[in-house]
Image (cartoon, grey):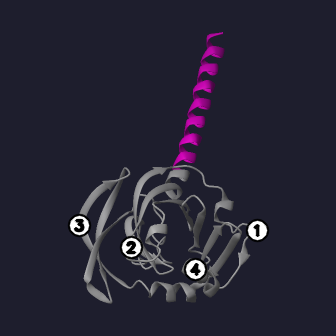
Amino acid sequence: MNKLKLIYKFSFALAITLLLSQCGSKERSVSDEEGIIEFSANAVDEKHPLFGLAPNSATLLYKKEKFAMEMTSMGMFKTTIIGNTKAKTVTQTVKFLDIKQACIENEKDIIADNLNFPIKIEETDETKEIIGLKSHKIKVTMANNPSVTFDAWYTKELGMPECNSLNPYALVKGVLLDYRVKKMGLEMHFMAKSMKKVEVPENSFEVPSNMKLVDKEEMAKVFSN
């Protein structure tokens, strides 16, 4: 009987150990390169005609080589930037009243877009904690206007060293947490406020079937109007 009890206790302990190891491995796989980051968002140029319509928050969903930045203005105008660093595509979707459009850019288009926000990056040794992550400071200078400089911050703790390969910060090997960037002529400042290490559904990075595919010029008209 004592022998049976010993076998039972050993089997139970082994089962618990296996269960905990499986749970731990699942959590690590999710936390490394998958989750959601909430950002505050602000337009940089107060004189820009779209300044008053700019969103004040943004949600970044990321999953290894895929990301989607969602922004909403006035509770009605919703735009999402969907990127795939493996496929080298960036898609912008817009949903406003009866307008439901999507524009897919390939690598050539992306390179041309990035030329509208040419920057020079200088690494520093300064670090601080942002949303619980060790973050590294970089000094950024506008290449076409050296008098304009600002600081940006990124983390290496989420992996994904090539996550910026589709934006002007391609030299930065980590996830940006405090930075500025321009899209459709509007320069925005994003600052990370919170993070959730959760699984992100694959359809978060897909263009909804009800979206009309348009070219870059037609998409630009939505913002200019």
Q: Position of residue 13 (x, y in %)?
A: 57, 26
User: What label does residue 210 carry, if any?
Assistant: 1
User: What label does residue 225 carry, if any?
Assistant: 4
**Mark 2 highlights which residue?**
172
Question: Which residue occupies the foreground of this view, 184 or 104?
Answer: 184
The outermost residue toward the right is 209
Magenta segment: 1-28
Q: In front: mark 4 or mark 2?
A: 4
Q: Earlier in the sequence, mark 4 or mark 1?
A: 1
Q: Amino acid at mark 2?
A: Val
Which secondary structure dominates the residues rendered in magenta? helix
Q: How far separated are the C-alphas under marks 2 and 3?
A: 14 Å
Q: How far separated are the C-alphas under marks 4 and 1?
A: 22 Å
Q: Label 2's element? A: loop
Q: In front: mark 2 or mark 1?
A: 1
Q: Amino acid at mark 3?
A: Asp
**Mark 3 highlights which residue?**
125
Q: Amino acid at mark 1?
A: Asn
10 relative to 30, above or below: above
Tags 4 and 3 touching, CB below 8 Å: no
Q: Position of residue 43 (x, y in %)?
A: 41, 69
Q: Which quadrant would residue 65 be assigned to in this image?
A: bottom right
